[in-house]
Amino acid sequence: MKTILVPVVLLFLAITHYGNSAKILGLFTAPARSHYILGSALMKGLAEKGHDVTVISAYGEKQPPKGKGTYRDIVVTEIQNSIQEMLKNEKMSMVDRENLNPFFAALFVGHVVPKLMEPVLSNEGVQQLIHSKEKFDVVIIEQFLNDAQKALATHFGAPLVLLSTVGANFWINSLVGNPGPTSYIPALSLGYTVPMTFRQRLSNTLLTLLNEVYYPLYVHPNENAKIKKYIPNGPDISDVLYNVSLVLMNSHPSTNQPVPYVPNMIDIAGFHIKPPKKLPQDLQEFLDSAKDGVIYFSMGSNLKSADFLPEKRDAVLKTFSTLKEKILWKWEDDVLPGQPKNVKLSKWLPQQDILAHPNVKLFITHGGFLSTAETIYHGVPVLAIPIFGDQKLNAKSAVRNGFGIALPYSDLTEDTFAKSVHEILTNPKYKTNAKKRSELFHDRLVGPMETAIYWIEYVIRHKGAPHLRVAAVDLPWYKYHLLDVIGFLVLVSLGLVLVSYYVVKIACRKLCSKQKSKKVKKH
Ligand SMILES: *[C@@H]1O[C@H](CO)[C@@H](O)[C@H](O)[C@H]1NC(C)=O
């Protein structure tokens, strides 16, 4: 009996485990909650599908999901401490951040953020994992100035998957050999829209060139030093950077400018959005009873409403007090001086469920990537007040697609704010276009979370799926840009011009001397 049982049990284990459950490590260590929300949503989706996931982040889940697979958190609290340190030293107002020079910002970010990430690899829990004998089937890392972490994929013998919270950009493109022509694809931080003017194309190209030099010469060597310091027998950074199996992108042609993708770049925008849940009682009543509609106002998780300058806040309040609509405002303080009767405050609001309510007519937002995707999902028009990062770009694309107005924080006055709010509330085109965008967003073969899970499992099944890599990643930059070919053609052309010049010159001299001799004969 026993002898039969053993193979049966082994067979059973093999069937239930093989192809069903993978061991997945995720690192989402960006010092911003909005980034973490996306990473943890993906890992929860994988755990619900039955995979065993381990998540390294600055936050961690208060209530880890109880799905088929296991969910393990390794929280690096040091990241939050180092941000607090930095914020203490940095007294930057919202306007300062809004007007940061993009060239300076590019250098600043590449210098500061990797430093903030250093505690990840030195963290005790992470070090224990590194020195354990554990293996993973795939390692998923958010692409965000944390290149040293990518060596963990090599260390754990797993394919590397990247998650981009903002879609295609310089960082992603350079790693997977994706074309990103600066003639028509503006860099995220510049906030340009197409078509770009000559000056914009010039800035766009110069910023890309700056990055192309800055990263290999400054950022990557620093990251390489971290690998050698924290990972035993760590690989060289040049061997891990360009060995990406898959890039999952929080973008979609309905929300982002359409751009070319190499085969291992996959759009999954909206994967973090859940079908609407029941609202808390008080909110449900507030929204249901708003016969004239509701304006929902939130500046996201990073920007506190309390950071608003008093004159800007008063401009907003004066406009609100004249409206018949109700306003639901995410406000982090207990009091709001001069709070009108139609305004309800709350420190935390279930944003997705609020946007799903049919009485919500307008979303006043900073235009972050989560808010943008959620508002498009539910077809709600926006008044975007962008501050930094990709927010300006998101705001402008809301304008281009006709479902929103962008009002930069520095331009916000009582006059501009009131006009923008009235325009969106009274002109039906914003709602119509928002609905149209929403239809485009939903019209897909399969949902974005299923897409993400399918591709992650695909990469596991096909051992990193190296057949998806384009050959561009193996070319040195001068070959990729055809500088050798262009140089050769220029030399040949120069040669031809020179040869022609001398041929003509010699021919001329011969002809002229004949004519001269003719002239001499005539006389
Ligand atoms: C590159 O990726 C492939 C496929 O995932 C893997 O087999 C190989 O070990 C990786 N190389 C390094 C240096 O990580």
Image (cartoon, rainbow, N blue to C red):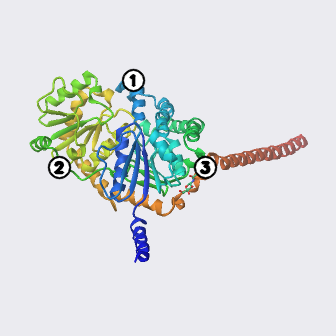
Residue at 22 percent of width and 34 percent of height:
347
Residue at 41 percent of width and 26 percent of height:
85
Side of 87 relative to 159 (left or right): left
Question: In the image shown, does 178 or 240 lie closer to the viewer?
Answer: 240
> Which of disc 3 and disc 2 is earlier in sequence?
2
Q: Amino acid at mark 1?
A: Lys
Viewport quadrant of the C terminus: top right
> Which of disc 3 and disc 1 is earlier in sequence?
1
Q: Position of residue 3 (x, y in %)?
A: 44, 76
> Which of disc 1 and disc 2 is earlier in sequence?
1
The local secondary structure at tag 2 comes to loop
The local secondary structure at tag 1 comes to helix
Task: Measure the C-alpha gap from mark 1 to mark 3.
Answer: 44 Å
Residue at 37 percent of width and 37 percent of height:
32
Task: Measure the C-alpha gap from mark 2 to mark 1.
Answer: 39 Å
Q: Amino acid at mark 3?
A: Tyr
Note whether residue 448 is visible.
no
Q: Which residue is mark 3?
A: 480
Q: Which residue is mark 1?
A: 88
Q: Position of residue 252 (x, y in %)?
A: 37, 51
Disc 3: CA contacts within 10 A as few (<14), some (14-19) or many (>=20)? some
